[in-house]
Amino acid sequence: MAISRPLLCFLVFFLLLVLQINGLIVSHEKAENQSFQIDYTRNTFLKDEQPFRYVSGSFHYSRVHPDYWKDRLLKTRAAGVNAIQTIVPWNIHELSSGKFTWTGFADLPKFLSLAKETDLIVLLRLGPYICGEWEFGGFPAWLLTANSSMILRTSDPSYMVYVDRWYSALLDKVKPFMYDNGGPVVMVQIENEYGSYFACDSVYLDYLRDKVVAALTNSSVLYTTDGGATGYLKCGKVEDVYATVDFGTSSNFVTAFKAQRQYEPKGPLVNSEFYTGWLDHWGEKHSTVDAVTLAKYLDSLLNYSANVNMYMFVGGTNFGFTSGANDQPYLPVPTSYDYDSPISEAGDLTPKYYAVRDIISKYLPLPKIPIPPDVPKAKYGKIPMTFVTTVQDSLHFLTPEGPYKSKYPVNMEKINFYHGFILYRTILKSDTKRPSILSARGVRDRAIVMVNAVPFGLLEREKTIDVNITGSKGQAVDILVENCGRINYGSKMLFNTKGIIENVILDGEIVTDWEIYPLHLENINNTLAVMKKIGKRVQPKVSADGKLMTPSIYLGSFEIKDQPNDTFLDPTTWGKGQAIINDFNLGRYWPGRGPQVTLYVPAPVLVPAPRTNYLFLFETESAPCGQGYQQASACQVNFTDVPCIDGPIGPGAFGHDNKNLQYYNDPEKHLHH
C-alpha cells in the first residue's frame, strides 16, 4: 500500500522527534551521573563519586587566536594535564556598557566546548577582577566614564550595579557548561587574590558568592585563590567557598599549605597558581624559571598529594591594547605574554613541556593521543616600508568625528575613548623665541611634544614632566599621548584615567583652549586611499638632537604564495609604536627598550595570494627612513621564523635602575595574578 506524502512526512517527523527525545534523555541521565565535590573526610576532590586529583594548566583564551585554541588544548592534554584554568576578562565581553559580545577572541562558549572535546575539565575564574597583567585587571575602562570615583572591588553601589549586570550575562552563558549539565566546568573562582586588596569588604564577596550559587544552583565547587600566607587569606577567605593558595618554586610549600589548613582544616591541598615562569615589563630582563627546578618542585608538590594549577602552561599575547601595567613605579607589560611557559606564545613545545610531562606521568596516566607538532613558522623576509603621512596630516581619518574642544585638558575617559593614542592641541598665543618650559605632570603615560610638527622632546610618567619648546604665535603645540596600559593590580587601579589628567603649564601659566583628537587606529587602513589621493606628502620633521621624528604612518605590503604560516615581525631598527596587519592589531613594539623585540604574527591574520598583506606601523618616535638614512633599504622590517623576546635592555626604561623593581621580579613578594 502506497503511503501518502503527508503521512510520510508525519512519520519522518515523528521518528526524528522520538530520536531527539531519547537523545535528550540519555544526555540528561549522563549529566545526572556527573558530579564534582569535595570529600572533607579523605581530603580530596570527588569526580563522579571517585577520588580525583587534578594537574591543571592556565590557558587564557583571550591571549591566543581562536583558530589555535584546539591546538593548544590538545597539546596541554597530551602532557598529561587533566584540567585547564582560564580567566574571563570582563572588558573583552562588554566593550561598551550593556552591549555584550561572545564571538572571536570572546567566544567563551566555543572555548569551553573545545575543552570538553579535548577531555579537559575547566577551572573557571569569573572575576570580575582577574589581574593577570591584563589591561585594567579585566575591568572595562568605560566604568571610569560611568563614575570615575567608584571604588572597585567593593560593595560600592555605583560599582555593584554594573557587576550585577555583568555576572547575570556571564553566568547565563556559563550555566550550560557546568559539569552536572554535561559540560566541563567543575570549579568556579570568584574574585582573585582579594586578600591582597586594601578593601577587605566581606559584603562584596558574599554577594558574588550568592549570585553564583543562585545562578548555578550549587552545581560546582566555588573557590578563592590567595597568597600562601595567613595574612592574605584573612580577607580573601569567603564563607562556604573553598580557600586555595598560590606560590612558586622559591616558597616552602609546607608552610604555604599550612596557611591554607588554618582556613580549610580539611579538604584537598590546592596550589591554584604554581608559577612556571614570571611576567615581563618593558625595560627589564626577560624572566625565566629553570626547567629542572620547576620539574623537581612539581614532583615534590604532587608527591605531597597536592592539586596543582601551573600558571602559565600556555603562553599568549597581549594583542592590540590589552597589556596592563604594575605600579609603583609605573611598569607597563610588553605585548608578549609568553611567560616562559611549557607551551610558548607561538604554540611551540619547549624543553620545560617535556620535563613537566615526565613528572606528571609518575602520578597520572598519560592519554593515548599523539603530541601535536609545533605550528609551522615561516620567513617572509625583508619588507620595504613607505612613509604615508604624519599624524598631523592624518587627523581627518584617524579622528573622523572631529576634535573635542575644552578650555582645559580632559582625560580620555571623559570623551568615551579608552585605548591607544590621543592628541592634544593648543595654539601659541604669542611668540616663544627663547626656550620655554612646558610642564605636563599629568601625562598618562608617555607623550611626544611638537611645535609646528617639529618634535621637541618626550614626556614620560614619573620620569620626565618638562620639555623646552620654542615657537611662533599661531603655531600648533601638539602633545601626542600614549596610554601604555592601565594598572592591573592594587589600590592604584582606582586612579586609572589616561591622557592628560592635569593642567599643562607653559612659562608658569596654565595653557587653555585645547582641541583633543582621539586617534582611532582601526581606521589606519584608510591610508591606502590617502596614498592614491594625495601627491607630494609633507615629510616627517626631525628634532634638533636628531633623536625624534614626527609621529607618522608607514606602510608595507607582501604576498604569500602558499597558505600562510606563523611568523614574527622584527622591527629592530624602529623606535616605538603600534603594528597593525590586515586590520589586526598585533600590539606594541619597542625594540630599543626591550626585552621584547619581535611580535608574534599568527597565520590566521595573514592572507594567501592573490590577496595582498598590508602592514601598517604607527611609529611615534624614530623610523629608519628619511633624513639621516641615505639608503632606501634602511626603511624596512623583517618577517622571521625565530622569536626574540629576550633582547637587550635599552636606556631610559620605566623605573630603570629603580630598586623597587625587585618587588615585581620576586613572585613571593608580589602576589598579583
Image (spheres, helix red, strand yellow):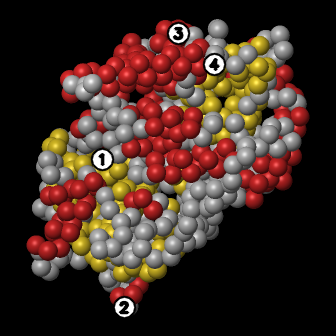
> Which amino acid, by three-letter code, is at mark 3?
Thr
Q: Earlier in the sequence, mark 3 or mark 2?
A: 3
Percent of width and height locating residue 176? 47, 22
Would you place residue 316 above or below residue 529 in this image? above
Q: CA distance from mark 4 to mark 2?
A: 70 Å
Q: CA distance from mark 3 to mark 4?
A: 15 Å
Q: CA distance from mark 2 to mark 1?
A: 38 Å
Which residue position holds label 2?
630
Q: Nearer the viewer, residue 563 or 25?
A: 25
Q: Residue at x 77, y 28 (%)?
A: 53
Q: Earlier in the sequence, mark 3 or mark 1?
A: 3
Closer to the camera: disc 2 or disc 1? 2
**Helix, strand or loop status at disc 3:** loop
Closer to the camera: disc 4 or disc 1? 4
Q: Nearer the viewer, residue 201 or 330?
A: 201
Q: Earlier in the sequence, mark 4 or mark 1?
A: 4
In the figure, residue 535 lies in which quadrant? bottom left
Percent of width and height locating residue 225? 66, 25
Percent of width and height locating residue 609? 33, 73
Which residue position holds label 4?
34
